[in-house]
Amino acid sequence: MRLLSTRSGRVTRGPVHHPLFARYYARISVGAESRLGMAGVRERLLAGLSGRVIEIGAGNGLNFGHYPGAVAEVVAIEPEPRLRQLALESALRAQVPVDVVPGAAEALPVKSEAFDAVVLSLVLCSVRDVPRTLGEVRRVLRPGGEVRFFEHGQGGGRAMTLTQHALDRTLWPVLNGGCHLAREPVAALREAGFRLGPHRRVMLPERGPALPTSYCALGVAWRPDEPDGR
């Protein structure tokens, strides 16, 4: 089921609405492509993908230009209206078919076992319910399908961890579209029943002082082939 197509050029208001953050994110994310090396991270994240892919939390669509030609279709879910409009514009420039639709990560508007891969790119930090989101990821993936993930989370020493938790309890989520700094995406994937493949720590920026958002994980996981998902 598709709620919004790139062909419609129409954006509807949904339950997620962060207009100030959307404007801010749209600006800094473009600069981060070269300044922080995000373009290279996106290349590594998406390399080798094929078939039907669903990207959850597509933002302003900066991944779209990095999907390899073997990808038959990308269904990109983005709940924030302004970012979704920017994603629609990015989809029109993509080299692979991209369909941008509204929807919540905790209730994806697509059929079960319909996709060969799921892409999670800086989204688990801001979803309202991580276990429910990953339950939806398992539902929409075919058995044996893969999850490509690039997520920031808890890291550093005791002082940095305390800082991340303190920011999460105060203004950080309010000012940053619901983002949380101290979540643990790799552990969450494991607890959700995914089989973890190669993954590694990535620091952004690679050089310079570590920030609360610097501790990232880049890797792959699979939905097991067993019917019960475990």
Image (tube, helix red, strand yellow):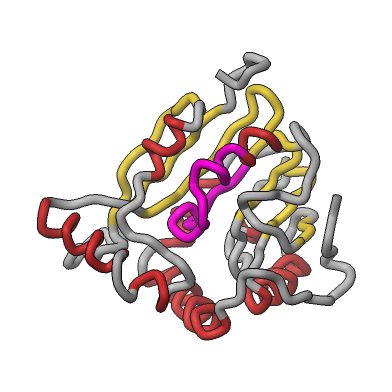
Q: Is residue 152 left or right of residue 42?
A: left
Residue 127 in the magenta stretch? The answer is yes
Task: Give coordinates of residue 122: x percent, y percent.
Answer: 47, 57
Most extreme residue toward the top, as rendered? 226
Which residue appears at 64% of the width and 51% of the height?
55
Task: Give coordinates of residue 179: x percent, y percent.
Answer: 42, 65
Which residue appears at 78% of the width and 75% of the height?
12
The region drawn magenta spans: 118-135
Task: Give coordinates of residue 148: x percent, y percent.
Answer: 53, 41
Which residue appears at 60% of the width and 21% of the height?
229
Q: Is residue 55 left or right of residue 193?
A: right
Residue 22 in the magenta stretch? The answer is no
- Above or below — where is 118 with respect to 192? below
Q: Nearer the viewer, residue 152 or 49?
A: 152
- Above or below — where is 227 with respect to 72? above
Task: Give coordinates of residue 196: x percent, y percent.
Answer: 44, 28
Which residue appears at 76% of the width and 35% of the height?
112
